[in-house]
Image (cartoon, rainbow, N blue to C red):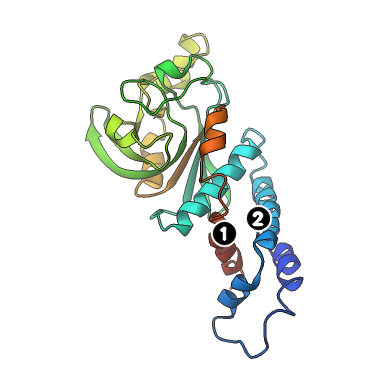
């Protein structure tokens, strides 16, 4: 695995902006002071380079870089808002890809690896092979785009299921709709082979194969970040989490802590 080039980034963005700006008399809470004196533009430049280097660690071009960068922004925005209890994992679901592709990625943010990559089903009325339409409405039987936090495991209609809490206008009804992560027979590689290489579809839930299912949800439960991405111009225009700069301070704090 390629090592992320954090130390050169640190030297580039810290040394060029901070050495002259920090008064020599400031010693206590130096790291916090440095952070506050760096401009947002410089932090954004650091983020762009960091994201590229982080992505290179995966050595996996099946993960769309645009999706990854948007997911990283949302992850840090939610962390900045103290909405993540489980910061170790980031789950990215790429509904721009066909359902016969392994389009769900479970990223370990500590080791900077893709821990799991698997197929995942979309909603019945969202499309067949491709996910084309999305909805936040009850009984729509469509998938909902946007950022979620994971909740608790419970035994419901689909037995061992993981609750989801929608955080945006595009998925705010997810909990009330009963949109959860569960495993299903129609979300397996075996089903693909029997169904003309098209995965089965859910009533709106992101359904996973049975294999490794419990291991996956046990890792990402209890407040981790999950992002469902699709081809939808309206969502790209309206989503506040992928357009805001609220993520930048949380990112930069983490960035600096890697050298403490």
Question: At x 74% / y 80%, what residue is drawn?
Answer: 20
Mark 1: which secondary structure?
Answer: helix
Would you say the residues marked 2 and 1 are in contact, meaning their CB atoms lie under 8 Å apart?
Answer: yes
* Residue 26 at x, y percent in the picture: 61, 87
* Residue 76 at x, y percent in the picture: 52, 54
The one nearer the camera, 4 or 152, is 152
* Residue 247 at x, y percent in the picture: 54, 55
Q: Which disc is residue 47 wearing?
A: 2
Quarter occupied by residue 178 = top left
Quarter occupied by residue 187 = top left
Q: CA distance from mark 2 to mark 1?
A: 8 Å
Mark 2: which secondary structure?
Answer: helix
Question: At x 44% / y 22%, what residue is drawn?
Answer: 188
**Residue 200 visible in the shown view:** no
Could you tell which of marks 2 and 1 lies nearer the N-terminus? 2
The one nearer the camera, 171 or 157, is 171
Q: Is residue 187 left or right of residue 129?
A: left
Q: Is residue 91 left or right of residue 252?
A: left
The one nearer the camera, 231 or 102, is 231
Question: At x 23% / y 27%, what residue is drawn?
Answer: 157
**Viewport quadrant of the C terminus:** bottom right
Q: Which disc is residue 251 wearing?
A: 1
Residue at the extreme left: 156
**Residue 171 visible in the shown view:** yes
The one nearer the camera, 137 or 206, is 137
Residue at the extreme bottom: 25
Question: At x 53% / y 20%, what residue is drawn?
Answer: 100
Q: Is residue 90 left or right of residue 206?
A: right
Quarter occupied by residue 37 = bottom right
In this view, 151 is above or below 157: below
Q: Dot 1 surroundings within 10 Å: few (below 14), some, or many (20 or more)?
A: many
């Amino acid at each position: 695995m390629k090592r992320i080039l954090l130390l050169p980034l640190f030297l580039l963005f810290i040394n060029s902006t901070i050495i002259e700006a920090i008064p020599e008399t400031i010693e206590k809470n130096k790291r916090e002071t440095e952070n506050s004196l760096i401009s947002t533009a410089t932090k954004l430049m650091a983020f762009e380079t960091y994201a590229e280097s982080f992505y290179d660690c995966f050595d996996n071009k099946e993960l769309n870089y645009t999706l990854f960068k948007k997911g990283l922004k949302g992850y840090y925005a939610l962390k900045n808002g103290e909405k993540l209890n489980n910061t170790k994992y980031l789950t990215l679901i790429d509904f721009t890809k066909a359902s016969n592709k392994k389009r769900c990625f479970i990223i370990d943010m500590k080791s900077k690896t893709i821990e799991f990559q698997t197929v995942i089903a979309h909603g019945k009325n969202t499309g067949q092979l491709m996910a084309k339409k999305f909805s936040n409405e009850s009984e729509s039987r469509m998938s909902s785009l946007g950022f979620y936090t994971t909740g608790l495991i419970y035994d419901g209609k689909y037995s061992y299921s993981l609750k989801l809490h929608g955080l945006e206008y595009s998925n705010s009804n997810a909990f009330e709709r009963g949109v959860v992560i569960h495993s299903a027979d129609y979300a397996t590689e075996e089903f693909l082979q029997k169904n003309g290489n098209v995965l089965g579809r859910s009533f709106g839930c992101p359904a996973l194969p049975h294999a490794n299912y419990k291991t996956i949800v046990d890792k990402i439960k209890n407040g981790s970040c999950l992002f469902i991405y699709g081809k939808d111009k309206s969502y790209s225009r309206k989503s506040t989490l992928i357009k805001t700069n609220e993520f930048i301070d949380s990112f930069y704090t983490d960035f600096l802590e890697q050298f403490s």
